[in-house]
Image (spheres, grey):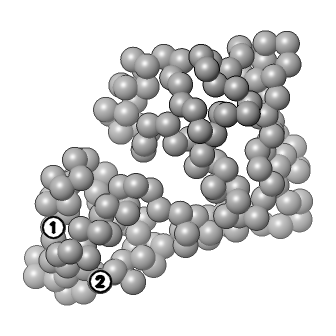
Amino acid sequence: MFDDRLVVESPGTLPGIVRLSNMRHVHFSRNPKIAQFLHEYEYVQEFGEGVDRLYEVMEAAGLPQPEYKVEAFMLNATIRNKVGEKVGEKVGDRVGENMLTENQKKIIALMQENPKISAARIAEGISISPRKVEENIKKLKAAGKIERIGTARSGRWNVL
């Protein structure tokens, strides 16, 4: 970790058919069983979106694209920031404003269709746990995307 960048070194080369030129669009799991386990227990949001999401978050924050290189059986990823700015706050603000996960988009769509929909019905509708729905609703409220009008029982959702 440096003042102007974060460098991550990972032993090994790029897996399967993934190359530096296509890594944003080609998805390959080095260990699909571990990946499936992490997805089923909701430790990862969406399969195959990590690299692409990194690019989107960096762009939204006004930061340069991540840099990758392979040297002597090591993959190096460099993520640069802007020295002197409060980059963490800037990234957080922009992600909250512009970046929604697929599940958050689905939640908003269901709320627009039925403003009185419950979190339990949302969970059924998009096939995620009620706990994950509540976490996403909390994030959407904090980002100013939705608000609850009225009580939990008789209220409704307002998509902003």
Callout 2: helix, strand or loop?
Answer: strand
Callout 1: helix, strand or loop?
Answer: loop
Can the viewer see residue 84 in this picture? yes
Horizontal and vertical percent for residue 121? 14, 60
Quarter of the image for residue 44 reads top left
129 relative to 28 in the view: left or right = left
The one nearer the camera, 86 or 114, is 114
Q: Residues within 10 Å of mark 1 (few under 14, many from 20)?
A: some
Q: In what quadrant of the picture does the C terminus appear?
A: bottom left
Which amino acid lies under the numbered mark 1 shown in the image of this protein? Ser
The one nearer the camera, 110 or 81, is 110
The residue identified by callout 2 is: 158
Quarter of the image for residue 1 reads top right
Q: Is residue 100 above or below residue 71?
A: below
Quarter of the image for residue 108 reads bottom left
Residue shown at 47% from the left, 62% from the top? 100
Which amino acid lies under the numbered mark 2 shown in the image of this protein? Asn
Horizontal and vertical percent for residue 109? 29, 69
The one nearer the camera, 57 or 27, is 27
Residue shown at 48% from the left, 73% from the top? 143
85 relative to 147 in the view: left or right = right
Q: Is residue 7 above or below residue 141?
A: above
